Every structure is written in C-alpha cells, then in structure tokens.
Amino acid sequence: MNPRYLKLLINLYPPYWGTGITVKSISPDYREICVQMKMRGYNRNYVKTHFGGSLYAMTDPFFMVMLMHILGKGFVVWDKAAHIDFIKPSQETVTARFLINEEQIERIKNNTSSGQKYFPEFSVDIENEAGEKVARVVKTLYIRKKVI
C-alpha cells in the first residue's frame, strides 16, 4: 500500500481522528513514522494533562504495521504485549517517532529463518514540544515466517 494512502486512512480512522492523533509522515520504505497528538478537551485527564490511554493509543499499531510492510506477505506479524512508562505530564502537543533500522530487520530474518517464532521488542519515546520525554512505550511483537 502506498504510504500516503495509508497515512490518509489512519488519519480518517475514527479512534484516531476522535482522539486528535495525527500521522504526520510515513517514509516511502516504512522505516519511519511520525505521529502527533495535540491537547484537546476530549483527550485530557482529570488533572488537565494528556490522558494516558490516548498516549498509548498514539503508539499502538505502528511497529506492527511498519514490519508488515517491510517484511512482506511471507511473514506473520502481530502485537503481543506492551508496556508504558509515564515519565512527565504534558499539556502540549506530543510526538512519537517510530524507527526501524536495517540491523533490527536482519535480526528478525535471522531469528525466523527456520520458521520459529520471534518476539522482538521495540521502544518509542513520546516527547513534548521541548523534546522532553513524556512517556516511553515498549512493544513486544510476535513474528514468524508463514508456512507455505
């Protein structure tokens, strides 16, 4: 799928649109995605900072989606687990930049070459406008080669 078309679809997806989460960019090779969320009355919590569920939601599918496109149809890729550390409250626009490098891709291919399951971890920091870390999300994925 064309990255620009996927960006449009995600930005129109009601759970993201409704929480103010916006995909700002997807690189042509799917190795980088940038997501932002502005503070709105409908995504803040009781103490008027970003709601933790919205912070997590802005990170939810992206590593899985990236790897599905990078690895192709010969692989099964699923989210398996996640952990979020809330580091600093924020009332401003927050950004998460997802990156997957060649070393990570090669490690996945090497660890799944015989059809075995592999559970790599990927982390992404959510930062405020000053570049300060607001939260860190660690995602564990389930990856294996499809049996043909």
Image: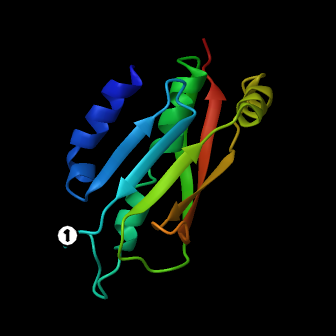
**Relative to 23, 141 lies left or right:** right
Extreme residue in the top direction = 148
Looking at the picture, how far across and down is residue 75, in whole percent? 59, 24
> Crowdedness of circle 1 by 10 Å Cα count: few (<14), some, many (20+)?
few
Residue at point 22% right, 50% down? 17
Residue at point 31% right, 88% down? 47
Q: Nearer the viewer, residue 147 or 118?
A: 118
Extreme residue in the bottom direction = 47
Looking at the picture, how far across and down is residue 50, in whole percent? 35, 74
**Relative to 105, 4 lies left or right:** left
Looking at the picture, how far across and down is residue 81, in whole percent? 56, 55
**Relative to 133, 116 lies left or right:** right
Amino acid, disc 1: Tyr
Residue at point 80% right, 27% down? 110
The residue beneath circle 1 is: 42
Looking at the image, is 17 positioned above or below residue 56? Answer: above
Kindly indicate the quadrant of the structure image that contains residue 38: bottom left
Mark 1 residue element: loop
- Asked if one can make out residue 84 in the rendered structure from this viewpoint, the answer is no
Looking at the image, is 25 positioned above or below residue 47? Answer: above
Please state, as top left, top right, bottom left or bottom right, where the C terminus lies in the image: top right
Q: Nearer the viewer, residue 131 or 103?
A: 131
- Asked if one can make out residue 106 in the rendered structure from this viewpoint, the answer is yes
Looking at the picture, how far across and down is residue 12, in whole percent? 21, 40
**Relative to 10, 52 lies left or right:** right
Residue at point 31% right, 54% down? 21
Q: How many marks?
A: 1
